[in-house]
């Protein structure tokens, strides 16, 4: 059969559609615009929802409250440095000033002695009271409330009061420094601010050695009115305090809060030895009261001392005595952050070069007393031992011992190396002490 040729009724050839560059450009621009819009919307939604949802996935951590430490200034070195600087400046400009000195006449100073009048004393007193009234914005009244029974077995609220000092803001709480004795074993703690508004507070930590405690008042419970009327106290440098300086006593130095008493520093050389610490105590010519407590401020309105009623600190005196605030700052910082103050339980003194030579005692910290039932006694430390090292770190002064102690935590085990006197000579002993907390 002859081959039959296929017949196609429709012959179709598919051709590529020509590119429309303008349309592609519009689509690209639109895509970029949508991407930008999506990014902006996502960013706004994230910013709005983050504060709400962040606590669900990541609990908020407390911010550490830091208190700057103080250093003692050496007046002699400062004077020498100033003199050297002046001498150098004088040498550089000596040639330039020779001609001027010939022309210039030396200045003439006119001095006149003038006795202070009663008005002058009154002006000075008024100025001190103005300083006191300003710092009183940092003073609060702390009340401890406990349930008690009277003679007829009827319940009533027994209260004790003391002054307190606003020392910081942790962004969650307002921190109040006060005496632990007034809030010991109480059912409730109340803080009254300078505008008479009263709020509940909670104990953060206290130090059984000094008797000081730090309270926290939640910021969410404090009104704007209170926040606008109060101030956070400035803790000054008391290491360079000198005899004769004018000071102001605030708080309740005579038992009544918001009192203002003025006077002078009479002594800065007294010290009190407590468990593991030695504190400098300032004496004043301000009349004291066994029920009083509060703070001592300088003429710049800075707190330089605390009046403490703790039996470890306070002695029977007719005038107010204050513990140096600079030596308490590290303790206050620990308490403000809810951290216990470490405790070993020795009362010691630095063995000076003179003591070492005269009594043939090794250098270090001489233990005058081991506190009964303390970690030190449990570890076997004895009166008369001389501490040479703590955890391998050499120490020669009580201050160095205190600095190492404050870096420890409750439950830490530390090796204390001591020199103990034998029949003929001192011998080294190692004692392992478990750090505790004094209650």
Image: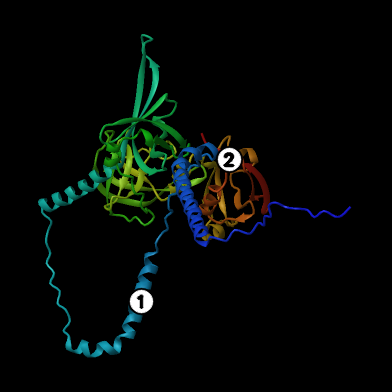
The correct choice, above or below, for 117 with respect to 79 in the image is above
Q: Is residue 251 visible?
A: yes
The answer to whether marks 2 and 1 mark residues whose Cβ atoms lie closer than 8 Å is no
Q: In this view, does 413 lie to the left or right of 205?
A: right
Q: Disc 2 to disc 1, how far (Cα)?
A: 50 Å
Q: Is residue 226 left or right of residue 73?
A: left
Q: What residue is shown with label 2?
A: 410
- Seen as rendered, the residue at the extreme front is 2
Mark 2 surroundings within 10 Å by alpha-carbon count, few (fewer than 14), some (14 through 19), many (20 or more): some
At horizontal 87% and vertical 55% (from top left) the residue drawn is 2
Q: What residue is shown with label 1?
A: 85
SS at mark 1 in the image: helix
Q: Where is residue 350 in the image (x, y as percent from the top left)?
A: 52, 53
Q: Position of residue 255 (x, y in %)?
A: 29, 33
Q: Nearer the viewer, residue 311 or 405?
A: 405
Q: Position of residue 421 (x, y in %)?
A: 64, 50
- Seen as rendered, the residue at the extreme top is 152
SS at mark 2 in the image: loop
> What colouring does the structure picture have?
rainbow
The correct choice, above or below, for 24 with respect to 194 in the image is below
Q: Is residue 429 left or right of residue 165?
A: right
Q: Is residue 63 visible?
A: no
Q: Which of marks 2 and 1 is nearer the N terminus?
A: 1
**Residue 257, quarter of picture:** top left
């Amino acid at each position: 059969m002859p081959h039959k040729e296929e017949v196609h009724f429709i012959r179709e050839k598919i051709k590529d559609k020509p590119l429309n560059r303008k349309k592609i450009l519009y689509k690209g621009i639109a895509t970029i615009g949508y991407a930008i819009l999506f990014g902006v919307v996502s960013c706004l939604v994230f910013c709005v929802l983050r504060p709400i949802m962040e606590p669900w996935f990541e609990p908020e951590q407390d911010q550490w409250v830091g208190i700057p430490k103080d250093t003692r200034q050496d007046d002699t070195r400062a004077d020498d440095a100033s003199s050297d600087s002046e001498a150098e400046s004088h040498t550089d400009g000596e040639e330039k000033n020779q001609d001027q000195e010939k022309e210039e006449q030396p200045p003439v100073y006119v001095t006149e002695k003038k006795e202070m009048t009663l008005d002058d004393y009154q002006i000075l007193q008024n100025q001190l009271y103005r300083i006191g009234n300003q710092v009183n914005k940092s003073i609060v009244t702390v009340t401890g409330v406990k349930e008690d029974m009277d003679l007829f077995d009827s319940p009533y609220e027994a209260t004790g009061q003391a002054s307190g000092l606003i020392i910081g803001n942790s962004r969650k709480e307002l921190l109040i420094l006060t005496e632990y004795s007034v809030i010991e074993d109480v059912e409730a703690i109340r803080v009254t601010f300078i505008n008479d508004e009263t709020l509940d507070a909670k104990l953060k930590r206290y130090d059984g050695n000094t008797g000081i405690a730090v309270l926290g008042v939640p910021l969410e419970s404090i009104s704007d009115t209170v926040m606008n009327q109060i101030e956070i106290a400035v803790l000054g440098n008391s290491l360079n305090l000198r005899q004769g300086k004018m000071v102001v006593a605030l708080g309740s130095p005579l038992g009544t809060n918001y009192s203002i008493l003025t006077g002078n520093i009479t002594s800065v050389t007294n010290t009190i030895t407590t468990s593991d610490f030695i504190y400098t105590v300032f004496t004043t010519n301000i009349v004291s009261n066994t029920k009083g407590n509060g703070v001592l401020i300088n003429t710049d309105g800075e707190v330089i001392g605390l009046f403490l009623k703790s039996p470890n600190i306070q002695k029977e005196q007719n005038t107010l005595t204050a513990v140096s605030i600079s030596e308490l700052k590290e303790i206050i910082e620990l308490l403000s952050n809810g951290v216990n103050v470490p405790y070993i339980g020795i009362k010691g003194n630095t063995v000076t070069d003179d003591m070492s030579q005269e009594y043939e005692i090794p250098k270090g910290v001489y233990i005058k007393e081991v506190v009964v039932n303390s970690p030190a006694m449990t570890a076997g430390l004895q009166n008369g031992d001389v501490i040479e090292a703590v955890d391998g770190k050499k120490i020669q002064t009580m201050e160095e011992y205190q600095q190492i102690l404050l870096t420890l935590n409750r439950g830490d085990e530390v090796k204390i190396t001591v020199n103990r006197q034998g029949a003929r000579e001192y011998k080294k002993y190692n004692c392992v002490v478990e750090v505790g907390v004094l209650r």
